[in-house]
Amino acid sequence: MTPIQTRTRPVAGQTAQMSRRVAEADISLFTEISGDRNPLHYDPEAAKSSRFGGIVVQGGITSAILNAVVAEELPGPGTVFLNVNWDFKAPVRPGDVITGHVEVLEAREDKPITKLRTWVVRGDGTVVLEGTAVCYTMDLCGNDG
């Protein structure tokens, strides 16, 4: 069993980010999980004639980078979303590099609950998702607080 390091509570102003390149295979993998077979993700002709002008990845792929930042970086392992409020601002396409960002807005003293500002930026600098999230961080050593 791997010991879990003692962590400090997040404080307002802390930030974290992670990046990844979105692959064409991500669309198929997400479809297997979600069942989302929208033609905007698969049919080049339908997607080209849409306002997006081409294939776009599912929103769940775009927002998933925030799951990674929250679970891996800030607040860190043991963290789950309690509430999210996200606005999708622009499309993400296969091949795009996306960077998920979080900033601690509030950290409760009485419970391991954190409110975050969240946003995802495409490699060209376009904000593709923005909003807030409320997270709960479980103590993986069994001392939820």
Image (spheres, helix red, strand yellow):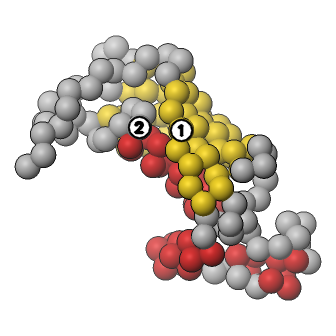
Residue that label 1 marks: 17
* Secondary structure of the residue carrying numbered label 1: strand
Picture layout, residue 111 above or below residue 84: above
Q: Quadrant of residue 91?
A: bottom right
* Secondary structure of the residue carrying numbered label 2: loop
| Residue pictured at 53% horizontal, 18% vertical | 13
**Rendering coords of residue 30 (x, y %):** 53, 72
Say whether residue 143 is visible.
yes
Looking at the rendered structure, the kind of residue marked 2 is: Glu
Q: Quadrant of residue 22?
A: bottom right
| Residue pictured at 71% horizontal, 50% vertical | 122
* Disc on res. 111: none
Picture layout, residue 98 above or below residue 73: below
Q: Which of disc 2 and disc 1 is earlier in sequence?
A: 1
Badge 1: few (under 14), some or many (20 or more) residues near its Cα, within 10 Å?
many
Say whether residue 27 is visible.
no
Looking at the rendered structure, the kind of residue marked 1 is: Gln
| Residue pictured at 30% horizontal, 21% vertical | 8
Q: How many marks?
A: 2
55 horizontally vs 109: left or right: right
Picture layout, residue 31 above or below residue 94: below
**Rendering coords of residue 117 (x, y %):** 59, 30
The residue nearer to you, when weighing 124 against 12, is 124
90 horizontally vs 82: left or right: right
| Residue pictured at 56% horizontal, 55% vertical | 20
Q: Quadrant of residue 94?
A: bottom right
44 horizontally vs 106: left or right: right
Residue that label 2 marks: 73
Q: Distance from label 1 to label 2 (Cα)? A: 8 Å
Picture layout, residue 113 above or below residue 73: above
